[in-house]
Image (cartoon, rainbow, N blue to C red):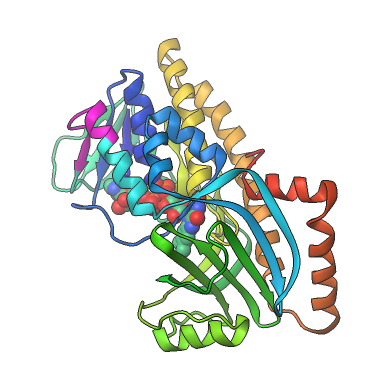
């Protein structure tokens, strides 16, 4: 099995396949791991996938648990959710480091860095992958494109990248701060000018995310000032914020013959309450079984097609949930703000709260 991309999803899938004794190779164009942190939240179904790959216990040790979420507006608590199993918080580079080390132990040499895949072609019972700077193609029985949002595999297959609703601009910072809320709680400040989120990180740090009217990374002082003005919290103006635009897309299909798309190559889910990495791990968990049984049967395509249909439906559900979360954090004033706050109060009480907590912890995906 050839996996294109050694991000969180490609690495996890490689560990699962290697554990079965399948011959797996991961082709990664970067020569060394990327330094940028993106995902921090690991949800119970994502943690189960990490346990299946053999890194669950290490990950748990490295993470800080988030036990509840609290929604506020202008300093007043609107409601809170308690999670039956904690969401774990750990920077994505650390998670990928653990997965990479695990893969090296399970299948030494399986990860090949500095290898950029430029084309993918299906032959009768094989897939041929063209690699930059190498004449001879690499041959595999199944190819998985886990090569991220700008997936080469998806483009070479000619699979459409369909936009879904939900787009907005944000800036974020991971900073040492004592002023962001209890160490086991995520805070969502649903303010008239737009949401400010604060999540615990290991070592007493917190991630701050702020909704902006346009895409422009504020300077550290501007970012600290924005937080002080919107929610009255103080963060040191030392770290440089990064700006990002949340967008959503789902590939028109996740499987063509023996080639499949998984993770961000298949779906881009807004990080605002969306959980792209965890969703990708669930793709991998199910794909591991579909590949193994398909190869045993001698013809993987029918099982891959079935996997693709189910995972595409899950991805569409995830984008709907993320759209809901983004809408709740949009700027609002007057009667709209009142109505939104009333809705949050209703949704964080009684049976609705249980349903919402399940949604935030990624059940049903
Ligand atoms: C600000 C932010 C916060 C986020 N927070 C969360 C969160 O809390 N929880 C969560 O679940 N998700 C979160 N996400 C989403 C998460 O980061 C992504 O869903 C996740 O990284 C997807 O992993 P992946 O392995 O599919 O793709 P990627 O991480 O993009 O990895 C793809 C890999 O493929 C390689 N590659 C690309 N093209 C080629 C090629 N042609 N040949 C060889 N290699 C190639 C790339 O170099 C890269 O290493 C967040 C995202 C952002 C932007």
**289 and 362: which is toward the camera:** 362
At 38% across and 60% down in the image, what residue appears?
A: 203
Which quadrant of the figure has residue 184? bottom right
Of residues 211 and 356, the one drawn nearer to the viewer in this rendering: 356
Between residues 313 and 51, which one lies in front from this camera angle? 51
Query: In the rendered structure, does residue 105 fall within the stretch colored magenta?
Result: yes
Query: Residue reaching furthest top?
Result: 297
Residue at 42%, 88% (x, y): give it.
Answer: 221
* Relative image position of residue 335 (x, y in whole percent): 86, 80
In the rendered structure, does residue 266 fall within the stretch colored magenta?
no
> Residue 185 versus residue 108: which sits nearer the camera?
185
Horizontal and vertical percent position of residue 18: 31, 24
Relative to 361, is 147 on the left or the right? left
- List x then y, in percent, for residue 287: 47, 29
Which segment is the magenta one? 102-112
Q: Disc count in the image? A: 0
Point out the image quarter for the C terminus: top right
| 342 shown above or below 259 | below
- Determine if residue 157 is in view: yes
User: Percent from the top left, x then y, of residue 13?
Assistant: 39, 33
Residue plotted at (73% across, 50% down):
356
Q: In the drawing, does residue 15 fall left or right of residue 89?
A: left
């Amino acid at each position: 099995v050839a996996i294109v991309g050694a991000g969180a999803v490609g690495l996890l899938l490689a560990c699962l396949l290697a554990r079965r004794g399948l011959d797996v190779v991961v082709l990664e164009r970067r020569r060394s791991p990327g330094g940028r942190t993106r995902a921090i939240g690991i949800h119970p179904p994502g943690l189960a996938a990490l346990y299946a790959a053999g890194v669950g216990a290490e990950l748990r040790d490295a993470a800080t648990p988030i036990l509840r979420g609290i929604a506020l507006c202008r300093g007043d608590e609107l409601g809170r959710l308690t999670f039956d199993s904690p969401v774990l918080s750990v920077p994505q580079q650390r998670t990928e480091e653990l997965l990479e080390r695990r893969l090296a132990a399970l299948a030494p040499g399986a990860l090949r860095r500095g290898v950029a895949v430029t084309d993918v072609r299906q032959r009768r019972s094989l897939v041929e992958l063209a690699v930059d700077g190498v004449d001879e193609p690499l041959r595999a029985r199944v190819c998985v494109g886990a090569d991220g949002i700008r997936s080469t595999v998806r483009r070479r297959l000619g699979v459409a990248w369909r936009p879904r609703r939900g787009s907005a601009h944000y800036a974020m910072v991971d900073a040492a701060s004592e002023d962001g809320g209890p160490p086991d709680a995520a805070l969502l400040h649903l303010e008239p000018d737009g949401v400010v989120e604060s999540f615990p990180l290991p070592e007493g740090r917190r991630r701050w995310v702020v909704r902006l009217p346009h895409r422009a990374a504020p300077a550290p002082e501007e970012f600290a000032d924005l937080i002080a003005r919107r929610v009255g919290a103080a963060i040191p103006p030392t770290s440089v914020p990064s700006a990002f635009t949340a967008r959503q897309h789902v590939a028109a299909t996740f499987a063509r013959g023996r080639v499949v798309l998984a993770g961000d190559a298949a779906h881009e889910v807004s990080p605002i309450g969306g959980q792209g990495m965890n969703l990708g791990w669930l793709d991998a968990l199910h794909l591991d079984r579909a590949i193994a049984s398909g190869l045993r049967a001698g013809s993987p395509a029918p099982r891959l097609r079935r996997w693709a249909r189910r995972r595409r439906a899950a991805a569409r559900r995830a984008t709907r949930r993320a759209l809901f979360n983004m809408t709740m954090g949009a700027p609002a004033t007057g009667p709209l703000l009142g109505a939104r706050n009333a809705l949050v109060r209703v949704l964080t009480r009684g049976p609705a709260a249980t349903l919402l907590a399940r949604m935030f912890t990624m059940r049903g995906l």
